[in-house]
Image (tube, coloured by chain):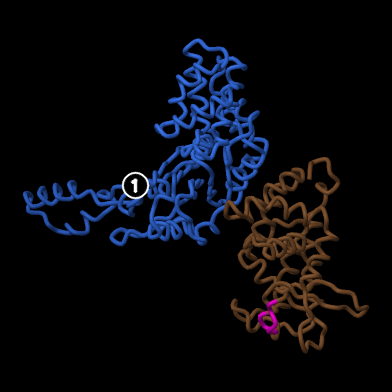
Chain colours: A brown, B blue
Amino acid sequence: MTDTDPESQRHFSIEDIVNFSRFLRENGIRTSPPESAMAAEALSHIRSAGGVAVFHSLKTVLCHTEEEWKSFDMLFQLFWSRGSLRREITKDRMVQAKGNPEGQTATEGFSGHSRKLYAGSTLRYNEKGELSVVSLYSPEEMFGSYSRVDVFEGAEARRLLAALKRISRLMPTSPSRRFADSQHGTINFRRYIRSVASLSSQI
Amino acid sequence: MGLGEVSLESVSTGLLKQGYIPSPQIVTSVYLAMRLGRPLLVEGDPGCGKTELAKAISGMLGASLIRLQCYDGLDVSSALYDWNYMKQIMEIRIRQARSDLSNLEEDIFSEKFLMKRPLLQALLRKGDTPTVLLIDEIDRTDEEFEGFLLEFLGEFQVTVPEVGTFRAEKPPIVILTSNRTRELGDGLRRRCLYLYLTYPDRDREMEIVRTKLPRVGNELVADVVKAVSSLRSSNAITKRPGISESIAWAEALDSLGKHSLDYPSAVETLSCVLKTPEDLEEARKIMDEHFK
């Protein structure tokens, strides 16, 4: 990817970064939700720079070892320049979870319902029967260490809010059911949405 | 340059002014380390410019550089603080002679008798200019010290039981380097931004040598860089030459009045590049091939 690529001029949303982090995790680079948050913060500092700076920023934030550093380039290319292929690969790696009335699927190897929820890989069929990705991390988990939410301004803040709301709508179970057993403790998902909403209106 | 003024461009030009030729990746990593206030862990082969990077950053910012050179057996008393026992004994004697022993214990364990080692110095540095703390070759320390460092880097504060807690007014810019002689723990890695340095490509290395030795001719620089590249690519060489060896070799050849590298002068001056008899022996064979 170069500065002149249309790809490099694209906007990198929170969802993009979260999905990219997951993709890295699935492929051996051990990223964590706080690091995804840090990546978002890093990108907010280089927003006027080109796509190459985005690549370098994500690499320095999300990699921790020489091995990860060396495999990052290929994974970055695969994810950002061949999005459709990425989706296909993700789909192929999914297996139908047994006895799941909502038609959710889980990553191969994670068959238990609660483990599946935190494996970061659940898909869901919508009313039209289309497959879509459901966020398995609550915003609290994603942005728990993200103390400076006010770096999001104007349109970006609106996009963040919309993304959080979209994730909220996709949750097929109640917030308490989904997050009560989390190792991070009980999280009131909707209250968090409200707090983000009120925060964004103050920006 | 103040921390508030930094941009990708200013980091790039700032490092160039210090004679450090940065790649775009280096510029971005340094910029983000300053912006996000995160330590930067720099790994890579010996001699690829890790320590120089920290020096260039401090030069660029006009900041003081505090260096903690790590070694096997480094402990908190050498890295953080120690008590000045001689001074304490003298104080006790003086106070005994004056028959003034009130609050003696409290007095001799006060900040006045504290010897501040590099980490504490970096925490307590005052003023507007930032401080660059270079923790060099962290892989040489043991896991115990690494655990201690984890806490230090997380909070930028330390507690001296007798005195109290010291917290940095302005956290220093921390650069850690490692040659990977030992695997660092996950905890430390996750607290840092990461930068892996390799030897520069030929063009960049030529630029670096030219910057350091502006009076040396282009032909000689190109020849030296090419020969060093041949040496580095051999698995038979145990201590591969770094950038500073390229510079030293070009300088030595220039001082011998050479304008290009030929086989006899290369073999005669190989000791500028390699330091063990085994490597020198291997290097001669490589030079045979190189000049064929």
Q: Where is residue B220 in the image (x, y as percent from the top left)?
A: 58, 17
Residue B129 visible in the current orientation:
no
Q: Nearer the viewer, residue A41 or B168?
A: A41
Amino acid under disc 1: Arg
Task: Please tell me whether residue A48 is drawn above or below residue B218 in the rendered image.
Answer: below
Q: Which residue is drawn at 67% across and 76% down?
A: A118
Span colored in magenta: A109-115
Residue B241: percent from left, percent from top: 50, 33
Residue A51 image offset from top left, x and y in percent: 76, 46
Please name the residue that numbered disc 1 is placed on: B117
Chain on which label 1 sits: B
How busy is the neighbourhood of tag 1: few (under 14 within 10 Å), some, or many (20 plus)? some
From the viewer's perspective, is residue A160 above or below residue A183? above
Question: Which quadrant would the N terminus of chain B be assigned to in this image?
Answer: top right
Residue A22 figure quarter:
bottom right
From the viewer's perspective, tell me whether residue A35 is left or right of residue B155. Answer: right
> Residue at image x 63%, y 30%?
B202
- Please tell me whether mark 1 sits on a helix, a strand or a loop: loop
